[in-house]
Each structure stands twice: as C-alpha cells, then as structure tokens.
Amino acid sequence: MDVEETPLPGIGIRKEITVATGRRVGVVIHRDGRSELIVSRLDDPDASLVSVPLTVEEAAGLGSLLGGAQLVAQLTAEHRDIPGVRTEQALIEPTSPFSGRTLGDTQLRTRTGASIVAILRSGEVLPSPTPDFGIRTGDVLVIVGTADGLAAAAEILHPR
Amino acid sequence: MTSTAVSLVELGVVFLGLGILGHLASKISLSPVPLYLVGGLMLGQGGLVEFAGVADFGEMAGELGVVLLLLMLGLEYTAAELVTGLRQSWMAGVVDLVLNMAPGAIVALLLGWGPVGALVMAGVTYISSSGIIAKVLSDLGRLGNRETPVILSILVIEDLAMALYLPVVVAVLAGVSILGGLQAVGISLLALTIILVAALRYGHVISGVIDSPDRESFLLKLIGAALLVAGIASSLQVSAAVGAFLLGIAISGVTAENATRVLEPLRDVFAALFFFVFGLNTDPGSIPPVLGVAVALAIVTSATKMVTGWWAAKRQRIGPLGRARAGAALIARGEFSIVIAGLAVASGAVDDGLAALASAYVLLLAVVGPVAARFIEPIMRWLRRGPAPASASSRAGA
C-alpha cells in the first residue's frame, strides 16, 4: 500500500491511498493543523465525493478508531477461550472528566475489574500503560473485562 | 467642523460602508474586492457623492495595503514549494503567460495606448486571483481533487512571475530606457534568487530575527521590516510590492504562520482601502465607453484560461471533467490585476481609460470566475449527456 503525498502550495499537504475498490481515500492537512477527510468519486476519480473538515481532536479520534478496530479484533481472538471476557474500545471525548488526568485517577481496575491494556493515540498503539499515563481527548482506551465491568467502565469515563 | 473632523467622519463612513459591503459579499459568497471597487466608484469624482477628505490618507493607506497584500502572498508559500512548483510546472506557466498576456496587450495596442499600456494590460489579464481561487476551491470541497495541485502550481508560478514583472512595469512607467528596465529585472532576479536560496538554507535565521514571543513587538517588527524592505526596493526601482513579497518568502515555518495571523486584520483594513481608493480615482463615467471592450476581453481571457487549465491538467493525465474544472477555476481575476493597474494609474504614464477598463474587467471576472468554477461541472456533464464515467476511458487514451 503506497501513501501518495501531494504538496498543495499555500494550503498544506494531501496524503492519500488508493483502496481496493479503486477510490482514493486520504486527508488534506492544512498548515494550521486542521484536516479534511477526502474520498474520491467512482465515476470521476479526479474529483472528491466528500471532503469533511475535522478538528485536531476529531482527526486524532478517527485515526485511533480506525487503528483500534484491528487491535480489538486481535485481542478478542486471543481471549476467545476465556468465556465472559470481552474487549472494547472507548474514545475519550472532551466531556470526559478524565480528559487531561492520569489513568490512575480513574481507578478503573479497582472499581470495575476491567483493565486498560493499550491506548491508541494519533494512530500509534501504546501498550500496557502505567497508572501515571496522562489521558487526552481523542485517545482510545482498549479495555478488557466482563460485560458488566465494561459497562461500568464506560459509565466512569463518560458519566451520563 | 475642522478639516481633521471632516476627514475622520468621512473615513468612518467609508469603513462602515466597506464593512457592510464585505458582509454582503460573504453572504452571497463572493470576493469583497469587486464590491470595494464599486464603493469607490460611487463615492469618487463623478460619483454619487464626492469624498475629498479621504483621498490624502487613502493614498498612503492604499500604498500600505499593497505592501501588506504582497507580504502576505509571500508568507503563503514556503521557498521549497516555490522551487518545486517552478520545476514541475514551468511549461504550464509559460503557456499561461503567453496565452493570457497576449489578449490584454493586443487590446491596449488596438486602443492606441502604446507599448507601456500594452505591458500594463498584459499583466492585468495575465494574473489570476490566487485569493479568490484558493477560497473557491476550499468552499467547493475540491482540495482533494487531482486537478487542484495543477491549479495551485500555476498560481505559484504566476506569483513568482509577478516578482519579475512588477519591477519591469515600475521601471517602464518611470520612463527609463530599455537598459534601465533590464537593470531592474536584473536586480529583482538577483534578489529573488538570493532570497530563495537564503530562505531554503537559512530561513530559520531570518525568521528568528523577526520572531518574538510577544504579539505586539512581533507585529511592530514585522511591519517595520516590511516597510523598510519595501522602501529600499522602491528606491532601487524594483517596486515596493516586490520587496515585501520577497520578505514574505524569506520568513518561514511557524513564524510565517504567526505572521499571517497577526497581519491578516491589518491587511484587510488597508487592502480594502486600496481597492476603494482605486475606485475613488476612477471616474464611473469613463466606464460605459470601455464596457464593450471589457466584456470582449473578459470572454477571450476566460477562454484562454480555460485552455491553460485544460492543457496543464491533461499533461498530468487528468480526465476531461477535471481539465474543465482546472480551466474554469483559473478564470477569476482580482486583487493583483488592480495592483498592477493601480501602479500604472499612479504614475500617470498611461491613458485614463486604462483604470476604467481594468475596473470593469476585474468587476466582471471576479464575479464570473467563481460562478464558472461552480457551474462548469454540471455544464460539462450536460454536454456529455448525463453523468457518463468518461474520465476512465479517456484517461487510458490520454
């Protein structure tokens, strides 16, 4: 898979890949850090079907969600032999009380029995985070636990 | 009222009026430049009301507006982008230059404005409005399109060409000989090369001198450097605007981004005044006689920009729809056509009709350009009978 990079003078840079269905999918990264998700048309591959403006946080969140899907599938497969254990991912939204605080502050394992096995940030996987790890908006926490434990964890991270 | 009081009141009314016009323009997603021109036309000599008190301040402020316009144009591009753009698309740049300078020059010669008028009108019809076009591409969600880099690199080359063209115009308008003109080109070519090399190698040093964590001192240093460089360039007969443009290129990275942010409001104020003053100094009564010529010139130079964009996009193996989009996007003319005409008018070395023709021409194409960019796609699809996926088959043949 090749990432094609095209400079856009005065605007920023475009990075895209051509996916199996023939569409170009990628991002336009503006100088000021804003980005746009772009998807090309099928009937006119030179043109864009959509171009969705994303804030820095939204882009990071989307990247982590895409990267996270694969990791979660892998972990789920590894835990298949243990009945009742599931893997889920939780995106930290700006409303979360723990955005800007440490993992230890959540006391997630003590309170729910579920544990955070990895954090996805800006497309990177950070495995086995320590309690002093600082959580930021846009991070995706990969949590392993029972169904009840995961529900409780979700409630702690984003109280309704 | 004292004359200061009168001037203040008139300036207040002018800025309020320009603000309302600008708001109106953004409502109908149009560039404010044509509306500022209309505002000036209505209030100047032979207009609805005469605003004499604004003129003195307006002249100097307009001058500042041009310096800021060009400084920010330079800030938009990094030296690396300019060099790559030049390397990749210089042929498209040459086609663009020949096709779009010729109509302006020919019309000026036919009108009997001589070689000086021809040189000026060539510039007016050549330069597309990078401001209008960048905004249109972004508004239409075309930044992801394949033809967009083609359009942007043509704009880059046009802007670089300005750095050589403006000194020539300034020298010729000042009435110097061919030798003097060549000398001006030599100086600015040398300066351009030095600045590009310096910005590529030592950009951070230049930026470091200007940079400051404090917003206020940063702004003052920026303005100081811009005016100083503009003044020196002007005294070397290389046009103040080009000096500012080169300074903009030399400032790079984070400093350039911060500079853009702090200068934007100032640029908006003074550039608005520049367009207004240009309108102010143009007698609206002189427009109707040249309107026919302006319309004809607009039609011809829309076609030549279409050809330019079509040809450049085809070279990058882009399909017919993308080629048409590239051509239509380039049609818009705006701020820099007026900058060129403004230089000519200020020197007094050209026919009075030139200001009127340039105004009418820019008014037409600043409005038609974005509209053409938007509607070229449905028109092309209709011409091709429905949304036929033509690009795939024709690409194979291209």
Image: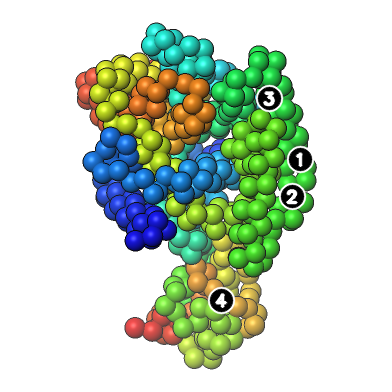
Three-letter amino acid code at the position of disc 1: Ala
Asked if badges 3 and 1 are on one and the same chain, I answer yes
Q: Residue at x 51, y 78 (%)?
A: A99
Three-letter amino acid code at the position of disc 4: Ile
Q: How far apart are marks 4 and 3 (CA)?
A: 59 Å
Q: Which of marks 2 and 1 is nearer the N terminus?
A: 1
Report the side of B190 relative to B355 (left or right): right
Q: Residues within 10 Å of mark 2 (few under 14, many from 20)?
A: some
Residue B121: name its quadrant: top left
Q: Compared with residue A94, is residue B227 higher up or lower down, i.e. above or below?
A: above
**Contact, CB < 8 Å: mark 2 with mark 1?**
yes
Report the side of B371 relative to B197 (left or right): left
Marks 3 and 2: which is nearer the front?
3
Three-letter amino acid code at the position of disc 3: Ala
Marks 3 and 1: which is nearer the front?
3
Check disc 4 and report the residue beneath it: A135
Q: Distance between the residues labelled 1 and 4?
A: 42 Å
Residue B216: name its quadrant: bottom right
- On what subunit does the disc labeled 4 rest? A
Q: Distance between the residues labelled 2 and 4?
A: 38 Å
Q: Which mark is residue B184?
A: 3
> What coloring was used for the rendering?
rainbow
- On what subunit does the disc labeled 1 rest? B
Q: Earlier in the sequence, mark 3 or mark 2?
A: 3
Check disc 1 and report the residue beneath it: B198
